[in-house]
Amino acid sequence: MRVSNVTVRKRLIFVLLVGLLVFTIIAIRLGYVQFALGDWLTDQAEDSWSRNIPFEAKRGEILDRNDTVLATNVSAPSVLVVPRQVTNPSEAAEKLAVTLNMDRERAYEFLTKQESIVRINPEGRKIDKQKASEVRALDIDGVYIAEDSLRHYPNGKYLSHVLGFAGIDNQGLTGLELYYDERLNGEDGHVSFFSDAKGQRMPDLADEYTPPVDGLNLRLTVDTRVQTILERELDIAEAQYNPDGAIGIAMNPNTGEILGMSSRPHFNPENFQEVPPEVYNQNKPVWSQYEPGSTFKIITLAAAIEEGEVDLEKDTFNDPGFIEVSGHRLRCWKKGGHGEQTFLEVVQNSCNPGFVTLGERLGKDRLFDYIEGFGFGEKTGIDLQGEGKGILFDRDRVGPLEQATTAFGQGVSVTPLQQVTAVSAAINGGYLYQPFIAKEWVDPETGKVVDSQTPIMKEQIISEETSKEVRHALEHVVALGTGKGAYVDGYRVGGKTGTAQKAKDGQYLKNNHIVSFIGFAPADDPEIVVYVAIDNPKDTMQFGGVVAAPIVGNVIGDSLRALGVEKRTDQIEKELDWNDEPLVEVPDLIGRTKRDLNESYYELNVNASGEGETVLAQAPEPGIKVEAGSTIRIYMGDKNE
């Protein structure tokens, strides 16, 4: 049957349309593959051909405020293997086993694994440079050296709980290393080479290098001059008293910047495995919670002055040695009491009944309003993990007895850092600052600051005038009261002792106390607050004024001298106890002759050096007060020298 022309044309058009449709589909698909998937397919192809030798980024260094290095990196190369490129696994295993001090069969397993790249771990992980050079010298096909690094803490145990440590992969595990891990960590780089399906290098393709991006350097608020002094004093205390633990904090009260922080027992971050986890996991200055004892009285004092409930100079209080509250007799530390005294003397003598009276004048709500206002019962917000927030009485369950004990620091739990932060507010004009330790982030290449932390003032708790009165009272504590051990000639130290009972199973332990002292200086314009607590010191009277106050005095005096803070002239004269050595003012010997010295009498020894008839230099400087019998070193010469 003959087909008409019309039918033929229709069939041809149909075939043409089908062909155009198929062509369009193919064209669209090719375009999609070329333009939409092109980069992805190229990356996938390159990934199947390429092998990456990693280059670790340098972890950011941690520095003190003056750029003293506290945590850095040291080179520690690692051995990598591309098994398919190893031509003679048996011979290579023999060589590697000898060089890396490992079992030959174990080396052979690494060299023959069905993987693209294999790390020899742990024998070839983070080795020293000499060992890496020995591996390179073996010239084994398929064996490479990758540039890795290890975290290094040049000062050992110094500031260990604050710094924390990083693991084998340079990841932060505790302390600042963990808290700021993301910013300290950089981005790893690598060298890529291309290989065929058998793993052999493709000689006509050049290697590609992707450089690592190093982490940012962290500059702290810590001042190593202060930190070194704090570490020294805690070492001495540990040797002298064999305590269960010790804590020290130094802070700038006007900014919240931590100048020093340490605790005992401590550890070397590079050997953290050698101590139990409870040692390296517990940064006691921010973690520990215990009854503060009499250092807490500063808060009650500040509240009473601010509310106009006491005139320290005019109001008096008779202390028979106890006070009755709700059928309980709350005793003063001094048997028989202090008798009639002003409230300034109540503060000087750390008289518990006197502070119970101040608490009663304030009442429950006002007392607890100030306690909470000074930051107790909540975290300070410092940039360190593991911070405790303390324990306060539930206000609804506070009766007269709980109110009374709270007023002198018993029955509540606080952290050392809370105390330092609160006392700083009490003596700096009333301003509560959030403590912090990370000051600036610095680009390691340019040295430019890319981010910084400024002081965070939360609120003003008391007035400038109240703060001035608190400083005045606490300076009397050090010059005339229970804190005489912290007295530093020329620096007007103020402070408060603390002797806290430790509780276990609902009962207070006997002869087992945390003794503490919190001090600041200069009293007219405070620049440093120092808190020290010694847990259960042995073979001594367990009082804060006996054990902790002298330690704080040493830290404050040496720190202020190291920081170049000028001495004051209007200091309250220290009232000497029976066992105190009298202080003698160093005379000015500059310009005096040998004859003058021989004809004069001093309660001091003189140690002369140099040739000549005239004193050209002396140490200590004139005007400084030292113990009678101390030695003055002088240098003799001629006037024209």
Image (cartoon, grey):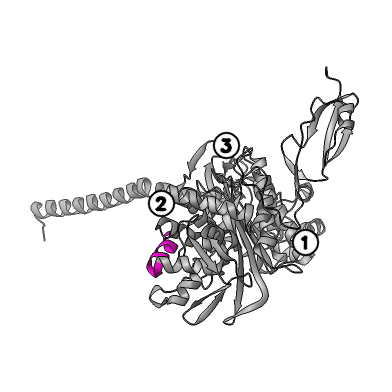
In front of the other: label 2 or label 1? 2
Circle 1 is placed at which residue position? 239
Q: Quadrant of the N terminus?
A: bottom left
Q: Do the numbered discs 3 and 2 sit on residues whose CB atoms are within 8 Å?
A: no
User: Is 514 situated above or below 452?
Assistant: below
Element assignment for label 1 = helix
Residue at 69% across, 69% down: 536
Q: Quick one: label 3 or label 2, which is nearer the N terminus?
A: 3
Q: Quadrant of residue 168?
A: bottom right
| 371 up-or-down from 490: above or below | below
Q: Is residue 559 magenta?
A: no
User: Disc 3 designates what residue?
Assistant: 445
Q: Camera-side residue: 600 or 364?
A: 600
Left/right placement of residue 419 relative to residue 66 reads left
Q: Amino acid at mark 2?
A: Gln
Residue in the foreground of this view, choosing between 110 and 316: 316
